[in-house]
Image (spheres, rainbow, N blue to C red):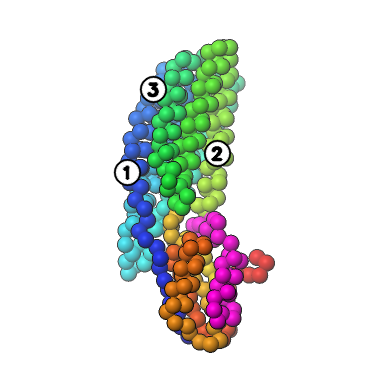
Amino acid sequence: MAGVHADLNHAPPDHGRAFAIGIALNLGFVVVQAYYGWVSGSLALLADAAHNLGDVAALVLAWGAALAARLPGSLRRTWGWQRATLLAAFANAIALLVAMGVLGWEALQRLAAPQPVAATTVIVVAAIGIVVNGATALLFLRGRRRDLNVRAAFVHMVGDALVSLGVVVAGALTLLYGWTWVDPVAGLLISVVIVLGSWGLLRQATHLLFDGVPQGIDLREVERELAALPGVGAVSDLHVWATGTTHTVLSAHLVVPAGAPGDDFYRAAATRLHERFDIDHVTLQVTREAVPFACRASLRRGG
């Protein structure tokens, strides 16, 4: 029996500067929004301010988790603190869902008894929000593809920019036609949009926390890739999971009747899995014959 592992993962990219700038921009804008939302009596503006405050907390949490994920492993924590990034994404999604539930309820109450708002103030402040949120989203544009935390930050900022645009439209309709009901409706729509976006983030974070196969990886394709390696007769005990938002791990048992292959075999296998599936850490166990006691949690046919 032979086994080997290969780790092609590099240190996760450092998005510290992007997080710091994003936090500063949004925190300053939250203060402006909250003040003018209170003065103008705009629920839509207050809802957007509350959501932006949640995004500030989300950015702080995500940044902290990203820093923790860069800490080296130890004898007690061999993977280090990489899973902190998954916990941060999960916590952020829960916080957003709770906050939007409260704001949605308030919007329904305000809709039953609409109140006048300072439409001009709402339009100006929300227009500033489009610029602030759009600029923050651009900070995370390049890093959004592989890191769940960065993608969550990007989606939130783009969503905020669109929400601010909706507030501008609501303010303009109130100013032009005197429709006081538009503002609470806008606040309710904001809550619904954010809940829909947060639900997807929550599902993905929960999936990865329970060692689910990362999005974009077809386990059947991975199995076929391993089975196609030279000399491989069978593949079993195949597992693919994420230790964090940027690190994917694979372990598998390969039956090679000719016996344990050389180092080139393992290097080639790790390289192919990395290039095709973005898997960073590969551990392969090789035997001449099938192991009689396979892992019960291994891949099931048709499952």
- Up-down: is 106 above or below 178? below
Task: Note whether residue 161 is visible.
Answer: yes
Could you say where residue 234 lies in the image, as x and y percent from the top left? 59, 79
Which range is magenta? 207-236
Q: In this view, does 287 lie to the left or right of 70?
A: right
Secondary structure found at label 1: helix
Q: Which of marks 2 and 3 is nearer the N terminus?
A: 3
Relative vertical location of residue 188 with respect to residue 84 in this rendering, above or below: above
Query: Which-is-in-front pick, marks 1 and 2?
Result: 1
Distance between mark 1 and mark 3 Cα atoms = 28 Å
Position of residue 107 relative to residue 295, above or below, is: above
Residue that badge 1 annotates: 17
Magenta stretch holds residue 101: no
Q: Residue at x 55, y 44 (%)?
A: 199
**Residue 27 occupies which quadrant of the picture?**
top left
Residue 189 at x, y percent in the picture:
57, 30
- Tell me which label, 1 or 2, sits earlier in the chain: 1
- Label 3 SS: helix
Q: Which mark is residue 195?
A: 2
Residue 115 seen in this snapshot: no
In this orientation, which residue lies closer to the viewer: 34 or 280? 280
- Which residue is at the far right? 302
Q: Residue at x 46, y 68 (%)?
A: 271
Q: Are marks 1 and 3 in contact (CB under 8 Å)?
A: no
Q: Which amino acid does label 1 sit on?
A: Arg
Name the residue type under label 2: Val
Task: Name the residue that disc number 3 marks.
Answer: 35
Q: Please name the residue shown 51% across and 31% down the image.
A: 162
